[in-house]
Amino acid sequence: MKSIHLQHTLPNVFTERTDIRSDIWLQDVTFEKGNFYLIEAASGTGKSSLCSFIYGYRNDYQGSILFDEDDTRNYKIRHWIDVRKHTLSILFQELRIFPELTALENIHLKNGITNFKTEKEILSYFEMLGIEDKLHQKMRFLSFGQQQRVAFIRSLCQPFDFVFLDEPISHLDDVNAEIMGRMITEEAHRQGAGVICTSIGKHIELPYKQIFKL
């Protein structure tokens, strides 16, 4: 996938509003592979909705979302399976991890499908992010910041043309945020991929081509 194109997209819940002032909603916006983008948002402006629209979890919007100019409304389940396995990775704000599994088991679930990373690479990610001692702990016993780092590692365990990071450092200290920034930059460059990050406050420092206000 070379581009994600939003054409006059707007959540259905916002259709009665007349005060929309946004660089994203109701605009013509294209995210291009290989570039980094930041979407700054205030609470209640539809940030998480945008993530779900692009990832195909929800379709309660007007306008269009195009992948390489193909309207995703026409996608069948098999299309979304292929996109989520090979093309589009995501780190959800709410993480969507399995609390009764260990940190490593959560990663193995994803990497077992894609076979994209070696065990050595996975273990090195845990070490880089300072959670190598949490490998075999159940996720429900980890702090949100630790869970956030595990979910980030999971997002790297697949090939992608774009990775969507929804508030990836909301619960991280500056040191870990900087480490995560280096990791995603290296991985994106390795894959020639685009990165789309969202933030309602503290944002991950990356070489952004463009910053949008949602």
Image (cartoon, helix red, strand yellow):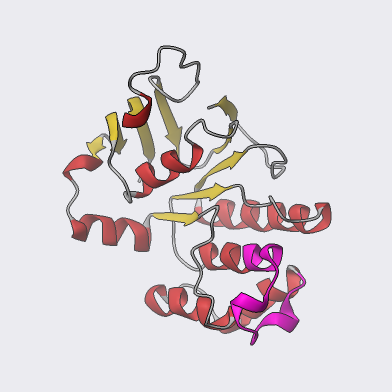
- Residue in front for this viewpoint, 45 or 104: 45
Report the side of 206 relative to 108 (left or right): right
Q: Quadrant of residue 198?
A: top right
Indicate whether 208 appears above or below 19. below
- Residue 34: horizontal and vertical position, in percent? 51, 42
Q: Position of residue 18 (x, y in %)?
A: 41, 12
At a point 42% along the width and 40% down the height, the residue shown is 49
The question of residue 142 being in magenta is answered with yes
The residue that appears at 68% across and 42% down in the rendered structure is: 206
For the point 77% across and 72% down, which residue is it? 130
Q: How far across and how far down the image is residue 115, in percent?
A: 43, 77
- The answer to which image quadrant residue 17 occupies is top left
The residue lying furthest to the top in this view is: 18
Write the start and end of the magenta stretch as one range: 130-149
Is residue 6 in sight in this rendering? no
**Secondary structure mainly formed by the magenta segment:** helix
In this view, the residue in front, 20 or 132, is 20
> Which residue is farthest bottom?
136
Spot occupied by residue 180 in the image (x, y as percentages of width and height): 70, 57
Does 92 appear above or below 115? above
